[in-house]
Image: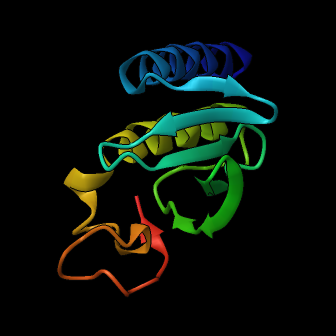
């Protein structure tokens, strides 16, 4: 069992490293910051996975994510959730039709609901 957990954690570490590289995320105080295709800057807390939009250099707006497919109660699950958020936020314009909380879609600019990833 411990070997399975260790392997899952190693895979999750690799996924996070790849997501950081692909999304061009930068280390910040409590996590990572990523700029979306829209030009918006988001931060993801490494421990809580909370996502915020930064406006004029300050954390401004909380963005709620409902991630039904990830067990964030485990270390590997939190890493998986972090990587998925970074990749999605980096491509914010491409996923805005499905992730309405970002408020970027032309069809849903004023709709603010939880995003399912």
Which residue does the image show at 52% across and 67% down from the upper left?
66
Question: Which x, y percent locates residue 96?
Answer: 27, 63
Question: Which x, y percent locates residue 95?
Answer: 25, 56
Kindly indicate the quadrant of the structure image that contains residue 103. Answer: bottom left
Question: Which x, y percent locates residue 64?
Answer: 58, 69
Figure label count: 0
Would you say 21 lies left or right of 56 here?
A: left
Task: Give whichever of 83, 72 is nearer the camera.
Answer: 83
Which residue does the image show at 46% across and 83% down from the upper left?
112
Task: Give whichever of 83, 93 is nearer the camera.
Answer: 93
Task: Give whichever of 12, 46 is nearer the camera.
Answer: 46
Would you say 76 lies left or right of 12 here?
A: right
Q: Which image quarter holds the C terminus?
A: bottom left
Colour theme = rainbow
Q: Is residue 43 above or below residue 33?
A: below
Kindly indicate the quadrant of the structure image that contains residue 101. Answer: bottom left
Which residue does the image show at 62% across and 44% down from the upper left?
43
Q: Residue furthest bottom?
A: 110
Question: Which x, y percent locates residue 1?
Answer: 69, 22
Kindly indicate the quadrant of the structure image that contains residue 3. Answer: top right
Which residue does the image show at 44% across and 24% down from the upper left?
19
Q: Residue furthest front?
A: 56
């Amino acid at each position: 069992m411990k070997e399975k957990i260790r392997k899952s954690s190693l895979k999750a570490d690799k996924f996070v490293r790849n997501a950081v590289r692909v999304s061009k995320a930068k280390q910040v105080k409590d996590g990572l910051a990523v700029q979306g295709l829209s030009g918006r800057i988001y931060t993801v807390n490494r421990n809580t996975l909370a996502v915020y939009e930064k406006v004029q250099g300050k954390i401004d707006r909380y963005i709620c994510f409902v991630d039904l497919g990830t067990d964030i109660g485990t270390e590997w699950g939190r890493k998986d959730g972090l990587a998925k958020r970074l990749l999605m936020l980096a491509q914010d314009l491409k996923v805005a039709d499905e992730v309405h909380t970002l408020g970027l879609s032309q069809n849903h600019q004023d709709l603010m609901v939880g995003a399912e990833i």
